[in-house]
Image (cartoon, coloured by chain):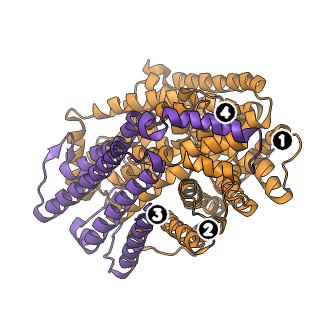
Amino acid sequence: MKLIYSIFAMLIIVAACVGAIFLVGEPDASTGTAHASIDALQVGGDGLARFQPVANIALLTFSAMLIMFGILLYLGISEHRRTRQCKAWIATGTIALLIVWWSMFGTYSAYLASGEFPMILGFPLPTAFTVYGLWLAGFIFVVAYVVGFRSFIFTKDDEEAYHELVEKFKDHGSTD
Amino acid sequence: MEAYRQPIILGSLLVYLVLCIGIGIWALRRTKSAGDFFVAGRSLGPAVVGLAIFSSTMSGFGFVGGPGLVYSTGISSLWMCLTSPLGLALGFYLVAKRIRIVAELRNTVSLPDVVAARYDSEAARLLTAITIILGVMGYMATQILAMAIVLKTLLSTTAIFADISLITCALMSTAVLLFYSVTGGIIASVYTDLVQGSVMVVAGVLVFITAINVFDGGMQEASTILFADDPETIMPFGTVGVITCIGWFFMFGLGVAGQPHVITKMMMNKNLSDNRTILPLAVLGYIMTALLWISIGLIMRSVVIAGLEDPLSAPDQAAPVFLTVFANPLLAGVVFAGLFAAIMSTADSFLNIGAAAIIHDIPQALRGRPLENELLWARWATFGLCVIAIAFALYSYYINNRLVALLGAFGWGTFAAAIVPVVVVGLNWQRATKQAAVAAVASSLLINFFIEISDVAIPYGLPGGFLALASSMTIFIAVSLVTPQGVLKPDIRAAMEL
């Protein structure tokens, strides 16, 4: 399946989810309200009441987005450089992002049901997934770029081909 | 040392501003052509480009608005800044290599140049240039206003400048920005970015260390205080809820790869292989600076709720009050210089791409050839843009902020919606067509404009920029699939296949 169709499919899923958000009922103060006693502060209020109607939509929307990011990154690799190593890096990063998201979602849902949570590195566990997990999982792609630079981003062969390309077209115009 | 707090802060700021002027004078000698003015002759090293990319991404918003947003809404706004590793990775995987190759082959000096080369379409160039100018005006007005307000806050604490007006502060701060932007163009801009980026990283790390030591129990004690007051504040989606957060993640994560002032810098490195160093540098710089964004907001909210400080009059006071109450005067000096650095590093980038759109891209699109003596016109356009932006900024402050708010709508969200499909996807998908490019840019303008004008209420706070970006991407792919594929020029096809 062509990558662009996969991206398009993810966009359609996101669009369907957006449609569902418009259709599902919106509780009061779904985006927070003013703090009762301190000006300029917002409060979230009843977490369960505002999360429940859109929980599954959010789960699907963000999962589709993360998969789309992975496919987009893969689209950025030249077709002839999409090696097994490249696939492994992109898949690892995308799966890590999904695991962080699903863990955040799961632990937050569990907290809403039970009211309990452990503290990890200064934050409630669901928040720790946000604070530490989201950027660390994204950082895998940065490491992949550095480690895989000469094997699937811009190899020595690519560099030679680039110089030949510049030599060929720069002096002779773009329409040669 | 506490007695000298204000002189230290003002002294730090003065040193920083003098340094910017010095760089402007130095860069004047190195700026000999429009290519030097707009893309630094594609001769920059990896450290300069890396720091320039991150410092122009992290504007004054990260130093003032960001902490204010965390103070006001808790964890929510982390969904904007924690996207940076993924967002910058998207930019480098999808754009950095190809845009640099096209720049070398076609001698491009601006993003609309690249769009015109990719699609062989002057209409796409024109629309991209118009989008950039609209966005630049909104961004510039807010950056100038932010500089003026900060300068007024600092100067009004001294006896001699106690009654200084906002207009004077706007003129003083913009004069420095204008001086180095006009004399040295992008060369001055990126080398001041080097200084600005370094100051921002130091400020971010030092503030973070200070912040987590405010409470004996560190961040855990702050979290406990916040949870007791309103559990949602410290839960993963903060007070704004899950839908807004994932909308922001999409808009800021994917959107960073569509910011013209960021990706234009990907055309400026001397060696293509330097990208291997530039990406991690930019990401690490951003993350270290974001520590300030995250920590100040959470700690200030905690101390106010705990009754250790009076409530702030406005969320944007979070950073200034934190620095006044908790920071050593030397640190406060560095951070205030860092704040100016953050604002200026974004503003100078916008001035540069705006000037390129006006004097290079629009004449090229309408007349089929650029202006004579582009360098001279570029300097005049930079000056003119700055003057108009000052007028907008002051108009919005004293008379009506609707105009700037409207132009502001053509900021991050519109850049993302217009440029991500056309450049980020288009440089990696040969089937993309010029009709699709025009449709995507036009739809991004229309959708953002409609959302801003109609004041339409979107359920669960779904950001308008998210809707515009998702729509323009969908439109771009759909239109490309149903319109006939154009024939790519051989050099562009070769660049896309490499």
Cα distance between the residues tagged 1 and 4: 17 Å
**Secondary structure beneath disc 2?**
helix
Q: In the rendered structure, the residue with mark 4 lies on which chain?
A: B
Q: Position of residue B464 (x, y in %)?
A: 50, 67
Cα distance between the residues tagged 4 and 3: 32 Å
Q: Vertically, is B482 above or below B80?
A: below
The residue to which callout 2 is attached is B436
Question: Closer to the camera, A101 or B100?
Answer: B100
The residue to which callout 4 is attached is B42
Q: Vertically, is A115 above or below B212?
A: below
Kindly indicate whether the residue at mark 2 contacts the one at mark 3 (C-beta within 8 angstroms).
Answer: no
**Chain appearing in purple on the rendered image:** A
| Chain B image colour | orange
How crowded is the residue under tag 2: few (<14 C-alpha within 10 Å), some, or many (20+)? many
Q: Residue at x 75, y 60 (%)?
A: B122
Cα distance between the residues tagged 4 and 2: 30 Å
Question: Closer to the camera, B428 or B358?
Answer: B428
How crowded is the residue under tag 1: few (<14 C-alpha within 10 Å), some, or many (20+)? some
Q: In the rendered structure, the residue with mark 1 lies on which chain?
A: B
The residue to which callout 1 is attached is B374
Mark 4 or mark 2: whose residue is earlier in sequence: 4
Cα distance between the residues tagged 3 and 1: 39 Å
Work out whether residue A152 can be spotted.
Answer: yes
- Please identify, in this view, whether the residue under mark 3 or under mark 2 is nearer the observer: 3
Cα distance between the residues tagged 3 and 2: 14 Å
Q: Position of residue A109 (x, y in %)?
A: 18, 63
